[in-house]
Amino acid sequence: MAGVPVDSEAVVEAAPRAVDHVEPERIAAVRGDAWFVIGALVALLLVAAAFTSPGITALLSAPVGIGLWRTTRRLQAPERWAEPDVDAIVHEVLSPDGVPEALEKKEGDSLSLHLAIQDRIDALEADADSRHWRFGRLVGVGVASLLIVLGVAVGLPAVWLAALVGVLVTYILADLLLARPRRRRIERAIDRLRALLPGERAALAVASVCLFAACAPSEGDSGSTGWPGTVDTLDGGRVVVRSPDVPQEGEWTLREEFRIGSIDADGPELFGSINGLALTAEGGVLVLDGQALEIRSWDPEGRFLIAFARAGQGPGELEGADGLVFDDEGTVWLLNWGNARYTGFDPETGELRAEHPRRAGYASFPWRGGFENGSVLVDVGLNAAGAPALLRLDDQLAPRDTLALPQADDDDSVQFRRDGLLIASMPDPFSPRPSWSVRPRGGVVLGMPDVYRLHRVSFDADTTLTLELDREPVPVSAALRDSVLAGFDDIAANLNASPNRAPRAHASHPAYGMILVDDEDRTWVRGAVEGDPDTVWDVFAADGRYLARVAIPHDPGFLHPVVRNGRMAVATQVDGVPTVVVYTVDRGAAP
């Protein structure tokens, strides 16, 4: 048996070969695949920006994950295998007594020896393939994981993070299922899964859970399971979202952090009147005292920091100031009404940063101006027809575009005249009046609260979203109606003027009142609900669904609250003293 002839050339010819890639060609292929991954990743993130569902973007990430896998497979090019040393392999497969083990159970057969050598070479190839596969997997998983970590660090939106997680999971699955195994792909994938270390298994499990969570309904996913509302897309692209009067996340609560101002306060905490309120990105508070004409600043813990600005008509001085709002460069702006200017300060040092003349001669108070996209100021003024309108200003804060506001019915106003001259006009009690708010991500949200319907409108007059809430009108109690009507007599006496008619109180409250849009594109609406119509706010998600209801313990009066980074600041009266209360917004759980 030891003398069985071996055809070495035949054995070598039968042995499998690894493809010997030329180095320049491999580098060019890696470069091409890398550009494909970069381009596909950019395209994926752009597509993600157009969707509100992380689940969709996670599914769209498959091409990027497969492209990343192709690139790392190029990096896995095997070491250049030398021609098989047949004599060494034959010696290795021979038993100690010089007889091939494969031939011990069979009569001398060159084919059996060939098969034994083939099995040994297959084992060597499998070992090399496993080592190269682990190296490429380390590169691929490392790149995808680094992208996710960087995304979290810079605060990427959830849809983008979901896309990156999808890339990671797709890469791992592609490497398990699409590699060129010597055996059946499914069997090789199972073997590789078994070969994963405990830490690697945990990483794959965490990534899979993240992908599953990303595919779950989000706040911006109007197709969430179990939501009883409807979404319709009209001709022209407007989306109409109709919600029942059941908030998806139930009641949100406000947890008080601190308050500024009290009956015993002195120094900066003693306010004459609060005419402007803003929150910094870190949670600090800025307050404009309209009586002292001074801006005061507190840190996120409620510790006083600095006071700046003063009364006067010179640069940076204030007269009839109102409102506070931040732009994307961190400058805090206000309406310097008495000086016909917009004035901007550095909130940390109090230094004057910029001033621009205000060319609009009309204003409404409290001032509701704000920045869309962080850099374009929106104010209210008059359009060419002399009607109140929203104004979008240019970089010199001069009016550039106008958007007409909804108008109340003239029949719902009482006019006061003295000697035939119009002195003032006031709306009938509980009559609907137009309400609006600047949307930080562009355009405005506005509506006329004769019904619970709001519109998201651009300055091109395109309505992109309409949200409706199915809520019954809240009746006005007889006691409240009589009290408000009695107040009209006092107004007429104070004006020394005669009304053109008796006021007509509406039977129901307006469907809603004040509106604000927060930094996460949620719309907050002061709703009218039975029990306490002044302090209950409805919160709508970015896609228009009715998300939550929030009861504010202190009535904010005419100055709208400020919501930013999970905090709310409210200017109110506590025991008759102007006070600012700062809350943390605690979100509820979906029922």
Image (cartoon, rainbow, N blue to C red):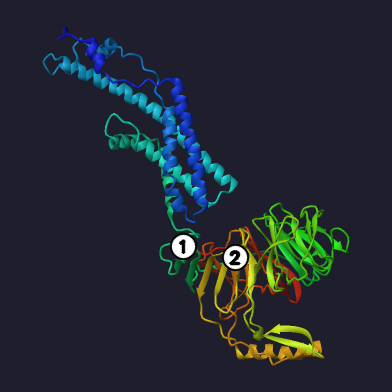
Read off the residue under disc 2: 461
569 relative position to 21: left or right: right
Q: Where is residue 295 in the image (x, y as percent from the top left)?
A: 79, 62
Q: Which residue is drawn at 45% across and 42% down?
A: 167
Q: Residue at x 59, y 46 (%)?
A: 154
Q: Residue furthest left?
A: 107
Query: Disc 1, disc 2: CB below 8 Å?
Result: no
Q: Is residue 203 visible?
A: no
Read off the residue under disc 1: 222
Q: Where is residue 379 in the image (x, y as percent from the top left)?
A: 71, 65
Q: Decide: few, some or many residues near mark 1? Use Cα within 10 Å; few <14, some 14-19, many ≥20.
A: many
- The alpha-carbon separation of the residues under discs 1 and 2 comes to 24 Å
Q: Decide: few, some or many residues near mark 2? Use Cα within 10 Å; few <14, some 14-19, many ≥20.
A: few
| Residue in the foreground of this view, choosing between 300 and 357 | 357
From the viewer's perspective, is residue 397 above or below residue 97?
below
Q: Position of residue 216 (x, y in %)?
A: 43, 56
Q: Is residue 526 visible?
A: yes
